[in-house]
């Protein structure tokens, strides 16, 4: 019997494709968001509100990941934003290869912002780098204040955490301050926004922050070329 | 349940290495699994049993070394080993803690039977 040293990260193959995706996005100066949450936290609603509020000045596109149906893509297209649907069948997350395949059919050249809406799931998508520049995690207040502590890996890896459905705080008996503190415990550094996609409260600060992120990315791309 | 994808990746990595070594079959795959990952040991073991069929690892054993989560405060140097409940704010300084270990998901080594041994 032979002992053979391997020393390879299990996610190495995904990481290599993600690095290639990232290089492509950086060349284009495109900000790429990997949007993740539990099912029903309001990813698509947040996306609709964000696309609407960003206005017509930006070149935007969306890649939707779902197990079944292209309903989310239809919602995005009805706003006039190009959207490509990946249906994963039974796979509970997007990986870098699925995104690379989508890019072959769905050109993203010259975009300011590409949002990849992941499959609704707080566990598996955390492990797979897609080549994004920002990991945005949405958590609805109605899910309970302890959600970040129950799914620490997902929240820990986020660059931005958006607490949605703040209008339901009182109705669901959840204290927004406690939820915020629990996000901080697993991720002291993330940008944190509290919004209600239904009433529009809080969306302005998130969209203003995103505009700045897009502006600094396009400046970086211009400087490089 | 992404453990099936993870199990498939483990086997792909092991098979690639085994082929480099002209191995006939893989008898053991040793991995390190951090506590602060999204992979559940039991689910991975179950998925491995499915994923190894019709591969060089068909009869291989999967050995999993659990790696505890360890954090350190860069400001005051205090270390928590192992972390029982994830809190990444230093109880002394209130500053963010750094994760020293617990995020591992790595194939360490394999044990193979070579063509020559069969002859």
Image: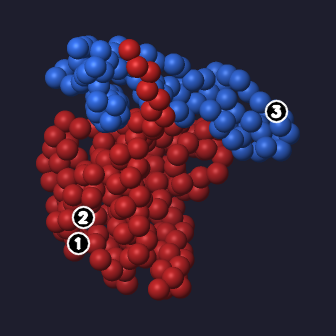
Chain colours: A red, B blue
Q: Position of residue A63 (x, y in %)?
A: 26, 60
Residue A198 sits above or below residue A181 on the image: below
Find disc 3 in the rendering and name its residue.
B78
Find disc 1 in the rendering and name its residue.
A107
Q: Quarter-wise, where is residue A99 in the image?
A: bottom left
Q: Quarter-wise, where is residue A39 in the image?
A: top left
Residue at 62% x, 27% y is B69
On the rendered image, what quadrant is the N terminus of chain B found in? Answer: top left
Q: CA distance from mark 3 to mark 1?
A: 49 Å
Secondary structure of the residue carrying tag 2 is helix
Secondary structure of the residue carrying tag 3 is loop
Find disc 2 in the rendering and name its residue.
A103
**Label 1 Cα neighbours within 10 Å, binned few <14 / some 14-19 / many ≥20:** few
Q: CA distance from mark 1 to mark 2?
A: 6 Å
Assess whether mark 2 and mark 1 are in contact (beta carbons under 8 angstroms): yes
Residue A189 sits above or below residue B90 on the image: below
Assess whether mark 1 and mark 3 are in contact (beta carbons under 8 angstroms): no
Q: Tell which of A74 and A22 is nearer to you.
A: A22
Q: Quarter-wise, where is residue A27 in the image?
A: bottom left
Count the marks: how many? 3
Q: CA distance from mark 3 to mark 2?
A: 46 Å
Residue at 16% x, 66% y is A105
On the rendered image, what quadrant is the C terminus of chain B found in? Answer: top left
Q: Position of residue A217 (x, y in %)?
A: 50, 75
């Amino acid at each position: 019997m032979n002992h053979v040293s391997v020393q390879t990260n299990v996610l190495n193959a995904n990481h290599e494709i993600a690095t290639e995706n990232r290089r492509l996005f950086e060349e284009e100066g495109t900000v790429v968001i990997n949007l993740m949450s539990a099912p029903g936290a309001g990813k698509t609603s947040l996306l609709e509100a964000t696309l609407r509020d960003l206005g017509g000045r930006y070149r935007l596109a969306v890649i939707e990941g779902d197990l079944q149906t292209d309903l989310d893509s239809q919602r995005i297209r009805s706003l006039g934003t190009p959207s490509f649907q990946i249906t994963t069948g039974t796979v509970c997350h997007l990986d870098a290869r699925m995104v690379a395949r989508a890019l072959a059919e769905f050109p993203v050249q010259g975009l300011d912002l590409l949002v990849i809406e992941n499959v609704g799931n707080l566990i598996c998508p955390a492990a797979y780098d897609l080549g994004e520049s920002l990991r945005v995690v949405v958590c609805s207040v109605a899910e309970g204040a302890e959600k970040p502590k129950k799914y620490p890996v997902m929240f820990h890896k986020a660059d931005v955490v958006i607490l949605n459905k703040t209008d339901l705080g009182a109705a669901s008996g959840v204290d927004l301050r406690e939820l915020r503190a629990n996000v901080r415990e697993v991720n002291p550094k993330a940008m944190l926004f509290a919004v209600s996609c239904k009433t529009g409260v809080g969306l302005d600060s998130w969209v203003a922050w995103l505009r700045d992120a897009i502006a600094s990315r396009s400046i970086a791309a211009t400087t490089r070329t | 349940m992404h453990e099936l994808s993870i199990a498939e990746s483990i086997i792909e990595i092991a098979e690639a290495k085994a082929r480099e070594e002209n191995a006939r079959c893989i008898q053991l795959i040793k991995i390190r699994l951090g506590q602060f990952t999204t992979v559940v040991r039991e689910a991975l073991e179950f998925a491995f049993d499915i994923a190894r069929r019709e591969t060089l690892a068909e009869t291989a054993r999967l050995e999993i070394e659990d790696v505890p989560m360890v954090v350190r405060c860069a400001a005051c140097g205090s270390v928590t080993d192992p972390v029982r409940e994830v809190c990444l704010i230093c109880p002394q300084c209130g500053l963010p803690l750094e994760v020293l270990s617990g995020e591992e998901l790595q194939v360490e080594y394999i044990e193979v039977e070579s063509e020559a041994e069969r002859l």
